[in-house]
Amino acid sequence: MSERLVELFSDLVRIDSESGEEEEFLRFLSALLQEELGAECVFDSYGNLISRIPGKNTTCKESFLFACHGDTVKPGRGIEPILDGDIIRSKGDTILGADDKAGIAQFIEAVRTAEAYPPLEFVVSREEEPGLLGARHLEYDKLSAKEGFVLDMDALDAVVVGGPTHFLIDITFHGKAAHAAMEPEKGISAVLAAARAIAAMPLGRLDPDTTANVGIIEGGQIRNGVPERAIVRAECRSLRDERAVEVAGQIEQICRESAKSIGATVDVSSEIAYHASSVDPASPVVKLAEQAVASLGLVPHVSTICGGTDASIYNEHGITTVVLGIGVQAEHSTNEHVAVSDMRRAVEMLHFLLSALAKR
């Protein structure tokens, strides 16, 4: 199993699929699922891959959802996986793409080798990394499953039952251009307004449930000009919906006050990417996840996280969904890696789940 699993995973990560550029990868995956698992595959209008796999050695008629995402963060072009003993990593100039292609490879290998499983719906979404865009635009009328697992956490003992409300905040400061040496007093610096606002914003971990961050700043075009425009991309998240609303409001108010203080203006656009959700820890899908983790000799760690996963959107749409680990380490970095032994254990955990679901 290990050799074939490594080969499949390596084939997957070699296909570029940075966010927004997943089409080639998803079409390759569609052909593979049809050939290897007898899947019926369709693409919805957003380009998400939805596959239906007929059950095997089961009387269960109800479909069960498994889901991953097909996009990677940057730098994710030209990935070349290297096997170093038990560890797979990239050459070091790109990410590895184990987030989330390790989960995809593990699912395929598990279904390939399972003795029994119910009818399965396997969704591979686009553009998860920028804000769960694929899951947000997924055509849910194409799904029938009422429960599911997202394969997208790091530690194999993880059972994630909840996530945050996530605000995407786009801010544009408008100043007035002027020559920075000849007549700076005639200008209004949009960069200065942005800098003052950022310095005043509540950022980092604000409390155990809440974080906020500024990820992108763009401003000015020439060194010797007072910049008339500056763009700030920020976000905030909280496991408490009302707290996320409060922090987003604080950030907007700070931006307006900063702009006004120097005679600039500002446009602020806030969008809720997804709302906080939580699955009852006593629900059957959580209990099954705990049993699967325990089958590996691990103690299940049931938790809510401030990171976003597609499970938040599936739960909003009435599919009770929890997140399981795939063994990836140092994701979103060029040091990203995964152990072959952990990938094999993840397949064993999926075997447990598929067998249990087939007996329902």
Image (spheres, helix red, strand yellow):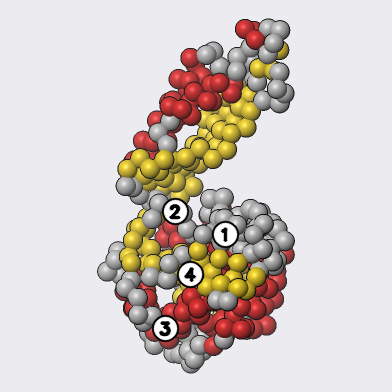
Question: Residue 352 got which mark?
Answer: 3
- Among the 4 quarters of the image, the one containing residue 11: bottom right
Mark 3 → mark 2, Cα distance in angstroms: 27 Å
Question: Residue 307 got which mark?
Answer: 2
Q: Position of residue 166 (x, y in %)?
A: 44, 46
Q: Residue at x 41, y 60 (%)?
A: 315
Instruction: Give the structural element (helix, strand or loop) at label 2.
Output: loop
Outermost residue on the front side: it is 85
Q: Nearer the viewer, residue 159 or 48?
A: 159
Mark 1 → mark 3, Cα distance in angstroms: 31 Å
| Amino acid type, mark 4 | Gly
Residue ID for mark 4: 327
Mark 4 → mark 2, Cα distance in angstroms: 17 Å
Q: Residue at x 72, y 23 (%)?
A: 222
Q: Residue at x 62, y 7 (%)?
A: 185
Point out the frontmost of discs 1 and 3.
Answer: 1
- Packing grade of label 2 (10 A; few <14, some 14-19, many >=20) is some
Q: Position of residue 81 (x, y in %)?
A: 66, 69
Instruction: Give the structural element (helix, strand or loop) at label 1.
Output: loop
Point out the frontmost of discs 4 and 1.
Answer: 1
The answer to whether any part of residue 51 appears in the image is no
Q: Using the image, determine if residue 203 lies above or below residue 209.
A: above
Lower sequence index among marks 3 and 2: 2
- The quarter of the rendered structure image containing the C terminus is bottom left
| Amino acid type, mark 3 | Phe
Q: Using the image, determine if residue 17 lies above or below residue 205.
A: below
Lower sequence index among marks 2 and 1: 2
Instruction: Give the structural element (helix, strand or loop) at label 3.
Output: helix
